[in-house]
Image (cartoon, coloured by chain):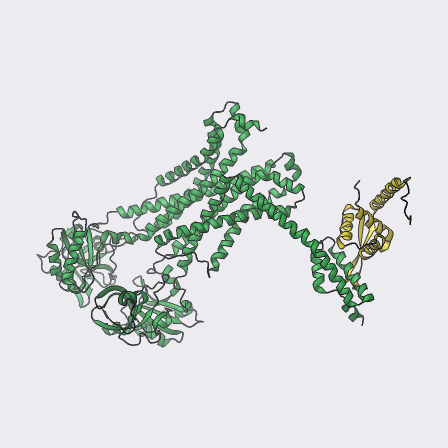
Chain colours: A green, B yellow
Amino acid sequence: MKKKNSYSSRPPKIAQFLLAKTIDKNIRYSAIGDFDEIFASIAKQEGNIRARLWYWTQVAKSIPSFITDSLYWRFIMFQNYLKVAFRKMMRQKVFSFINIAGLAIGMAICILIYLWVQDELNYDKFHENANNIHRIVMNDQNYGVKWPVVSIPVGPALKQDFPEVLDSVRVNDFIGLITYEDKKFDEIGAYVDPSFLGIFSFPFVRGNAKTALNSPLSIVISEEMAEKLFGHEDSLGKNVKLNHDLDLTVTGVIKNIPENSYFDLDFLAPFEIFEKRDRDPTNWGRFQLYTYILLQDNTSFKQFETKIAGFLQEHDVRQGPQLELEPLTRIHLYAADGGGDIRYIYIFSIIAVFILAIACINFMNLTTARTSTRAIEIGMRKVTGARRKDLVKQFFGESVLLSLIALVFAVTLVFLLLPTLNNLTNKHLSLNPHGNWNIILGFAGIVLFAGFLAGSYPALFLSALKPVNILRGALIPTRGGAKRAVFRRILVVCQFAISVFLIISTFIIFKQLHFIQNRNLGYQKDRIITVPLRGNASQQYEAFKNELLRDSRIRLATATSEAPVLIRKIHMGYDWEGKNPKKESRMTEVIVDHDFIETFNMTIVQGRDFSKDFPSDSTEAYILNEAAVKTIGTDAPVGMHFSAPIHAGMREGTIIGVVKDFHFQPLNNTIEPLVMFIMPESFNYLCIRVQQDVSGFSGTIRYIESVWNKFAPNFPFQYSFLDATFDRLYRSEQKTGRIFGYFTFLAIFISCLGLFGLAAQIAEQRTKEIGIRKVMGATVVGITLLLTRDFMKWIIVANVIAWPTAYLAMNKWLQNYAYRTSIGIDIFVLAAVMALLIAFLTVSFQTFRAAIADPVDSLRYE
Amino acid sequence: MNLLSRSEEIVLLAIWKLQKDAYGVTIRSLVNDSTGYEWSVGAIYAPLHRLVKKGLVRTLKGEPIPARGGRHKIFYEVTPDGKNALHQIKRVHEAIWQDAPTLGLDES
């Protein structure tokens, strides 16, 4: 009974909680106890209901005073903080501008880099099965060849043999000519198994993904292509021609493949067509197509990889290569053919962090410099009752507010700069916070991070000062002051070290680019036009070439399997006189016409060039480069017996000459052994050396086109300049160089803003000293130097830190190139001089102004 | 020495009067009864807290009591300093009231 009684005489929980919240915590314990006791006595005398009523009345009574006490005053104080913050900002406009602008630029760069990195990291993640799709890679350890292609039977066999493989698809991409009525377009497409549409998620606009590729005479095209071919007509059921020899019916239209996909295909044709045409579709050793498999959800791909390593040997004992797996989502950044490069992701992420660090340091430095003049305000606030907690809140709040303003500018800046970035990277990045929570979280993170960092000094250090000391005039305790100055200088050193690092890196990147572009490649690459040979232009090549040569503007023309800027075909199984049979014979191979060496201005160092005077040249002559001669290991290669594997078997012949080594691959690679011979059925390109006339090249190009139309009217005329093709090889380097350049500029700019502010601050603090020095007879130059010297010293320290770091980093980068420029001391000195000069100009503006000031003014305020 | 505010004075006197039984509830009811109107929570506890801080009153923890939700009673006790303060107040009052003309009202 007692229990029940005591239970019933408990005050309501919610009311008690509210009451506890509203009572000052010093008296909370005893007051709540008292209230409970009174409640109990009322409950005993007048009943539970009255007691509850009384209790609630007490709560209701205490709420208004609670609100006025805490919330109202908080609001008033908040208003005051805001007002003070804005006043400070307005009073020191230049400072505030520098402060906010620096941070805004830093944030903007960070956001831009973040957008880019996010885009790069998300390649092919949009597929529903993205994490379970893997590409099969063949790895031939005997020859050191690793390439993501396998033979025709591998895909279906894997699916049959392993329950873990849900599906497999073979993909053979090629450039195909699609014609519809009078329209003809060259597009990148692929022969794919019907399972392609089930494994990858490419949404259909028209047609049915399940059945679209079932018929061997169907074709699926992209939305963009549908519009090019058929305009607004319905594409389903239309008949198009592929390469003039196949009539296919459009059975589906897919949405354009998004940019962040490794695939870049505009049509899909059934794989059956490819398989039927293949000479030897059951051969396990002809590595020629991409194959993807879809693994079961819970299969570990690492484990599965070990299971299939020896798969080829199980089916065909002669096969040496092992199979490996490559996750689809890693292709873009990690695979050799992916198009992206994980190193750039790292490099730019690091730059983003660097620049944000510089900007934050700046922000912190300037805020700190400014707040030390606010000591009096702190003193006043403390005297009138502000607790330390309040000051901490105030300063943190203020710097978060500033960084919030910076964010607004940063976002504006991002919108302005995005088109440039998209242009530079060929992407369509956009700042679309819709559904992109990461960005919003990132923003909040940056604002809070920068705000707290910048606010930490005044909030934690200044707030601890004793008001008595502040107001008595001992503004900043000297020991703390000295420490703070050192700290600030360390920050300046860090900033400039980063800047100098970036300057050096940029210089070296550009030096390497310059080196690449001006290196003697061993052949002439300008004034050469390449035209892919197709149709009758290919079949009647000799006639086509002779027709072209009739024009005086065309000097020379030759045909080749690959243009010399990039020759990639590597073969094995060459044989020569005295070859060690155990030795591997891997060489790069290029098929050329008689006048190839002449057209490209290459040098014959031994023997002779191909010549029409020797009819046997077109069937049995070989020309090797110097590297190949070294592989063979002879001093007198000319006249040696040599043979190369071709379709029909071995092509027996002799070496007739040696060509001087030329760079047929990007300068990242060393010059490999190369063998050249004539085989007209493998000509792919016509290379034409032209002369400029009054109209530039346009007249010549028009002429070539008219000849083309005579020979191959049903193929579009295409051409490119060899030097442009060459430049494209180094596009990523050029882009990197340019982006580095921009970033370096901005990093320096932000650092200078900080330095400028700091110099102004110090000049202001030393006004009195300068005045006295002048009175004592110091010269303007002397004072300027006095104030500047200190900064210069720290910039030199920054250089000392940056030099070895930059040297190590850039040396590592240069290792990517087999042929590289030297890292001379000149670059480092130049970077140092630049940094010093920029810093000097920035600082001396302020110091000079301080030095020329009239001492009467500076001493009068005493 | 610090002058006490009127509410502090009243509360201090109330504690002295209650002697061993001075805690929130009794102090409040005594003050309410003698002044004739209901003192709010803040009006009692804020001066109490100030008195504690000034060292005129000290707190003693009593036994936990079920009626208080298992909380301890917090008793208040006047310290020697507090006694001095009361003395002084009394002296001042008496000195000022001495020889003052009667207010002409009911003296009770």
Residue A254: quadrant of the picture? bottom left
Q: Please tell me whether residue A150 is drawn above or below residue A23 in the rendered image.
A: below
Q: Quadrant of the C terminus of chain A?
A: top right
Q: Is residue A53 left or right of residue A802?
A: right
Q: Residue furthest left?
A: A613
Q: Please tell me whether residue A554 is drawn above or below residue A91 in the rendered image.
A: below
From this viewpoint, is residue A310 visible?
Answer: no
Q: Quadrant of the N terminus of chain A?
A: bottom right
Q: Which of the two residues, A474 or A635, is positioned nearer the viewer here?
A: A474
Q: Is residue B92 left or right of residue A191?
A: right
Q: Position of residue B1 (x, y in %)?
A: 80, 40
Q: Please tell me whether residue A477 is drawn above or below residue A567 in the rendered image.
A: above
Q: Please tell me whether residue A690 is drawn above or below residue A136 in the rendered image.
A: above
Q: Residue furthest front?
A: B104
What residue is drawn where x is 34% and y is 51%? A735
Q: How many numbered marks, from 0 up?
A: 0
Q: Which of the two residues, B64 or A587, is positioned nearer the viewer here?
A: B64
What residue is drawn where x is 48% and y is 29%? A851
What residue is drawn where x is 78% and y is 65%? A50
Q: Which of the two residues, A716 or A634, is positioned nearer the viewer here?
A: A716
Q: Position of residue A815 (x, y in %)?
A: 34, 50
Q: Position of residue A601 (x, y in %)?
A: 17, 50
Residue A589: quadrant of the picture? bottom left
What residue is drawn where x is 54% and y is 33%? A765
Q: Position of residue A236 (x, y in %)?
A: 30, 73
From this viewpoint, is residue B37 visible?
Answer: yes
Residue A152: quadrant of the picture? bottom left
